Amino acid sequence: MAFGIFIHRSDSIYDDTPAERYQFPKQYLERARTCVGDWIVYYEPRKIAATKGYYAMAKVERVITDPSTPHMYLALIEPGSYLDFVTPVPFSDVNGPIERGVLNEAGRISGRAQAAVRGLSPSDFARIVAAGLADENPLLPRTDFAVVEPVLREEQAPFVFDEARERVSAIVSRVVRDRVFRRVILRAYDERCAVTGLKLINGGGRAEVEAAHIRPVEANGPDIVSNGLALSGTAHWMFDRGLIGLEDDMRIIISRQANDPGSIRSVINASGRILMPQREADRPHPQFVRWHREHCFKH
């Protein structure tokens, strides 16, 4: 087992769904196999406009031959392991590449940086995760700091493999994941309810909006931004109970079983569709929208 980097472009030609699977050619098979049972970091190349850099982590469950495409393979992601970073991490900063493993003996970036699948040292992994989960306005409760702090602080000494893995395991508790997911969703939607269009901030400066999973965690819904919506408390309640849903074109639909459809209609923004994130990759994925319509929405 070993940590790794999977390069994924938002305009990928491969059959990738980052929270579920990663498709790759045979040349990367052995590298991908070494990551089975361990964590990888997704990276979007610098040549992509508005690149996210290192933007998420996930655990590889197994590697299989792609049954639908000859000479291709799939790294299957362990359900529930995918987690978007609170803060996408750039390839380099004033100190150079954050992924030190891409440097050659002369301290220059080597061709290894171009490999779509590559190994990642425990220290590089810990450094990237620390930067990705750092937040200048953290939502984590004080009671969690004892668990999370060792991973988020700057690296004081070289990380050994087991130590890095144990620290990551502590970070992905449900409590922490919920707060990271909320931060990611609120940022994508500019702290505005996707249904009502309202952006309400309370006296303490906290947005009065919640992060809703389109496909619930209990139904194997991943903690990925494309499976989330920023919703006010009332809109969240209606969405979870199937009183409102979404068409594939993101038009908001109202259940025939709602006892006061007129009142529901009155709180929906004037466009009749949800307000979506600017970045296309952050918008609700059709597969999650369809799942909600088929399994939650009350027709």
Image: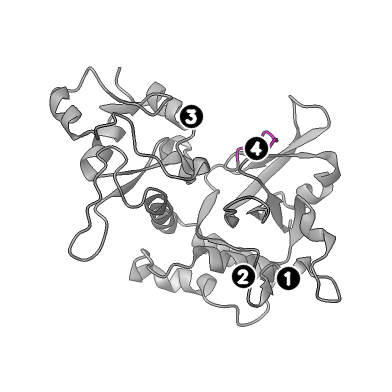
The numbered disc on residue 286 is 3
**Magenta residues, start to end:** 12-17
Q: Which mark sits nearer the N-terminus, 1 or 3?
A: 1
Residue hosting label 2: 127
Marks 2 and 3, how far apart at CA: 34 Å
Could you tell me the amino acid type at mark 2? Arg
Magenta-span inclusion, residue 287: no
Could you tell me the amino acid type at mark 1? Arg
**Secondary element type, mark 1:** helix
In the image shown, does 146 or 158 lie closer to the viewer?
158
Residue hosting label 4: 16
Q: Quadrant of residue 137?
A: bottom left
Q: Which mark sits nearer the N-terminus, 2 or 3?
A: 2
Crowd tier of the residue under label 3, counting other residues whose Cα lies within 10 Å: few below 14, some 14–19, many 20 or above: some
Marks 1 and 3, how far apart at CA: 37 Å
The structure residue drawn at horizontal position 40% and vertical position 21%, both measured from the top left corner, is 294
Q: Is residue 159 visible?
A: no
Could you tell me the amino acid type at mark 3? Pro
In the image shown, does 93 or 219 lie closer to the viewer?
93
Residue hosting label 1: 100
